């Protein structure tokens, strides 16, 4: 059955890219709503459904836009909603960005679990992959969705920094695995990238409180990594969140190599352009 929140939830924090303070009110919503953002600070409070077809920017986060209304950095919240099987929610936000919190999905996951969910009286929307669908960027990054009876992800990264290096994640995405191995993992970047992005006026809200920062062979955060494979596990969370912009719970196995938000979005566009590659249950 479809599910929505048992009660409303309030979360606030700063946006990673904008540096703006934003307040979220995540509210129960009727069957068939899906996950919808609502920009309460804009005239007419426009709504932006969290769908792959509304994704307009994937460079540093997954950013939605419909009309004039932009909502960015949705992916960690979307991952928590996906794994907790929240089908319908109205997410009121009073700024252009979902708060980054501690850079992981832990606060979203814990808060959503704390308020709980209720079943609605219509079956949930499931998409089963029937044939492998791939997107390859031609530069070493690729993603493939293949048929499977559950959602599982194999993710491989290879970073020049020796503190990250080659990491592989391979597991079924269950609430237990998400809570223990994926949700605590923070976003990460190279210090050189931070300097460059800040020179462009981006990641205004970024700090060691909400990101792991790597400087060649060092990690600048005094506490170090939370788990040894924190970087690849964070990429898995991004993928879970991005896949949920399909609007469905996907039965399939994602194999990802050096990929990111761009690849995930291109993969969904390709998938939905070939109706013979999937079935809706
Ligand atoms: Zn992320």
Image: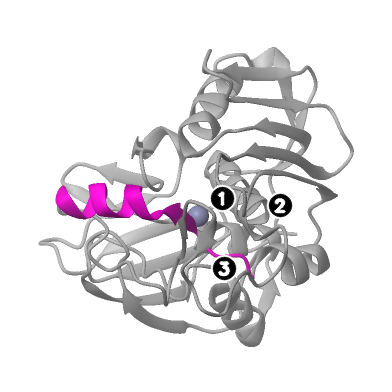
Toward the front, the furthest residue is 217
Query: In the shown orientation, is residue 255 left or right of residue 109?
Result: right
- Mark drawn on residue 105: 3
Q: Residue at x 36, y 65 (%)?
A: 98
Q: Are marks 3 and 2 in contact (CB under 8 Å)?
A: no
Circle 2 packing at 10 Å, graded few (<14), some (14-19), many (20+), is: many
Rounded to the nearest angstrom, the CA distance separating label 2 from label 1 is 22 Å
Tell me which label, 3 or 2, sits earlier in the chain: 3
Quadrant position of residue 211: bottom left
Mark 2 secondary-structure assignment: loop
Q: Residue at x 66, y 76 (%)?
A: 117
- For residue 105, above or below residue 253: below
Toward the right, the furthest residue is 149
- For residue 207, above or below residue 200: below
Query: In the shown orientation, is residue 130 left or right of residue 210?
Result: right
Residue 158: % across, % down: 64, 37
Circle 1 packing at 10 Å, graded few (<14), some (14-19), many (20+), is: many
Tell me which label, 1 or 3, sits earlier in the chain: 3
| Residues drawn in magenta | 184-200
In the picture of the structure, the residue carrying the numbered disc 1 is 238
Residue 45 in view: yes
């Amino acid at each position: 059955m479809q599910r929505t929140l048992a009660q409303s939830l309030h979360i606030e924090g700063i946006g990673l890219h904008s540096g703006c303070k934003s307040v979220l009110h995540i509210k129960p919503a009727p069957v068939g709503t899906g996950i919808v953002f609502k920009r309460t600070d804009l005239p007419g409070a426009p709504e932006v459904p969290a769908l792959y077809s509304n994704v307009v920017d994937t460079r540093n986060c997954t950013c939605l836009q419909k009309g004039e209304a932009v909502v960015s950095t949705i992916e960690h919240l979307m991952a928590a909603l996906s794994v907790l099987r929240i089908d319908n929610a109205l997410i009121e936000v009073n700024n252009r960005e979902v708060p980054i919190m501690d850079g992981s999905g832990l606060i979203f996951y814990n808060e959503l679990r704390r308020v709980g969910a209720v079943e609605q009286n219509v079956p949930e929307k499931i998409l089963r992959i029937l044939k492998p669908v791939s997107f390859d960027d031609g530069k070493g990054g690729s993603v493939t969705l293949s048929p499977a009876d559950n959602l599982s992800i194999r993710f491989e990264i290879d970073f020049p920094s020796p503190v990250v290096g080659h990491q592989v994640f391979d597991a079924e995405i269950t609430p237990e695995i998400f809570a223990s191995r994926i949700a605590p993992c923070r976003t990460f970047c190279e210090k050189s990238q931070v300097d460059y992005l800040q020179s462009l006026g981006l990641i205004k809200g970024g700090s060691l409180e909400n990101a792991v920062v790597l400087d060649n062979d060092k990690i600048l955060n005094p506490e170090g990594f939370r788990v040894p494979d924190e970087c690849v596990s964070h990429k898995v969370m991004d993928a879970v969140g991005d896949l949920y912009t399909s609007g469905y719970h996907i039965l399939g196995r994602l194999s990802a190599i050096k990929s990111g938000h761009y690849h995930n979005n291109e993969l969904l566009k390709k998938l939905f352009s070939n109706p013979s590659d999937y079935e809706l249950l």
